[in-house]
Image: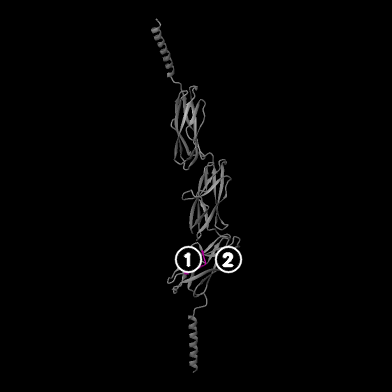
Amino acid sequence: MMFIKQNFKKLGIALILIILLTLPPASADWSSVTVITSITGKVVLPGDTVEFPITIEKGHNNSDEAWCSLSIKDKSDGWSAGFYNDGDQVTGLTFPEDKNSSKKITLRVKPPINTPNGAYAIWADFKPDDGDTISQEFVVNVDSEAVLDLDIYSDMPGLETRPNDPVEFYVTLENDYDHRVTASINVAEKPDSWDVEFLEEGNGKYRITKTSIAANDKQNFIVKVRPSTNVSDGTYPVIVDVALENSQIGVSQQLDLTINRGIEEEKMLTIFPESKSINLNPGSSREIVVNLRNSGDRTLNNVELKIQGVSGITTFVRSFGAIDELEPGESREIPVEIKVRADASPDTKEILMRAVSDEAESEDERVEVSVVKSSSGGFIGIGMIIGALLLLVFIVSKFGRR
């Protein structure tokens, strides 16, 4: 009898254990979703942003529609933290019915700029519509000596040019973060009255103030620098700052521009007179055509032909003022009348011509004008005298006998 009672007692204990093992636990051991985090700890600079990739999957044995709310359970004062999906902040996810699917989100954490070095915990809660809340700890190690995952460099950080002659530096911005970043571009230092522009590399026309770079990617842009006209020879720094959006941290690049007035300048503006030498009698004139050409790669504005005056010779430019714009490769023909005064003595003189614009000027071109008196003038005078004498003889011989 005692043996039977002991057997019943053992059987009861076994049944209780079986029941306890088959009941769902009152903890996060069962949920309609699963949270997968492969990285739960990262190092970051004070004021920088760090991101943790998270995957949330719907349970394989759940055919119903599932929903999961996302929240930050605990964080340090002054810290910002939130969940993002495709760049948008989210607070909940929905999984469709009869479909086992997963969704990727990002936990984005940013400590204040004055955060002391140390390890800080962020607790996130994932609460499904069915089951227990899943809590996950993420550790952020703040280190003021950490390397910023943003780099800036130029393969040619030093160039040489003449005053008022612009140059272009090509600068590369490299994003080593595992997430996309947006950064603003500014000039931190430049000489007074210098002009600095940031241009898109693709066409070199559009000005940029911000750039967005994908994770582990790089982007090039142009820094166009135009020095002032009256700048002295020497090397001048131009410092470019790139700061992460909504942050006080960033990177900088120094570009050195050397000014050298002795550099041989390639003439953008050239002139070609159709004649380099002409002969004119006193009181006569002649019209020649002067060709003005833009040999550079940018538009020239207010292009005008200038002619230096010479005694005894006058010049008239037959055009309606300056040329507003002369495109690269374009040329214009300008008629010029050259006239010698009637009392001019025989001589040879040079007329100097130069084309000028707001951006450049040409080299001087010379047109040689030789003033010569006609050799046939004396023969004509003698002929007129002989003709008059013959006419007088004819008149006397015919009418003088009467």
Q: Which residue is denoted by mark 2 in the rendering?
A: 119
Above or below: residue 402 compared with residue 373: above
Is residue 373 left or right of 238 when viewed as pictured? left
Q: Is residue 399 above or below residue 296?
A: above
Q: Which residues are magenta?
A: 89-94
Q: Amino acid at mark 2?
A: Ala
Residue 99, position in %: x, y? Answer: 43, 70
Give the residue type at disc 1.
Lys
Disc 1 versus disc 2: nearer the observer: 1
The x and y percentages for residue 349 are: 49, 26
Q: Earlier in the sequence, mark 1 or mark 2?
A: 1
In the picture, residue 137 is in which quadrant?
Answer: bottom right
Q: Residue 175: give x, y in percent of width and height.
A: 50, 57
* Residue 220 can be seen, yes or no: yes
Which residue, given by chain and number where applicable, does mark 1 sit on? 104
Q: Relative to 266, is 30 above or below? A: below
Q: Residue at x 49, y 87 (%)?
A: 12
**Magenta highlight on residue 381:** no
Inter-mark Cα distance, 1 to 2: 26 Å
Q: Position of residue 258 (x, y in %)?
A: 54, 44
Quarter location, residue 394: top left
Give the secondary structure at mark 1: strand
Q: Nearer the viewer, residue 108 or 283?
A: 283
Report the disc number at residue 253.
none
For numbered disc 2, what is the local secondary structure? strand
Residue 61 versus residue 326 in the image, above or below: below
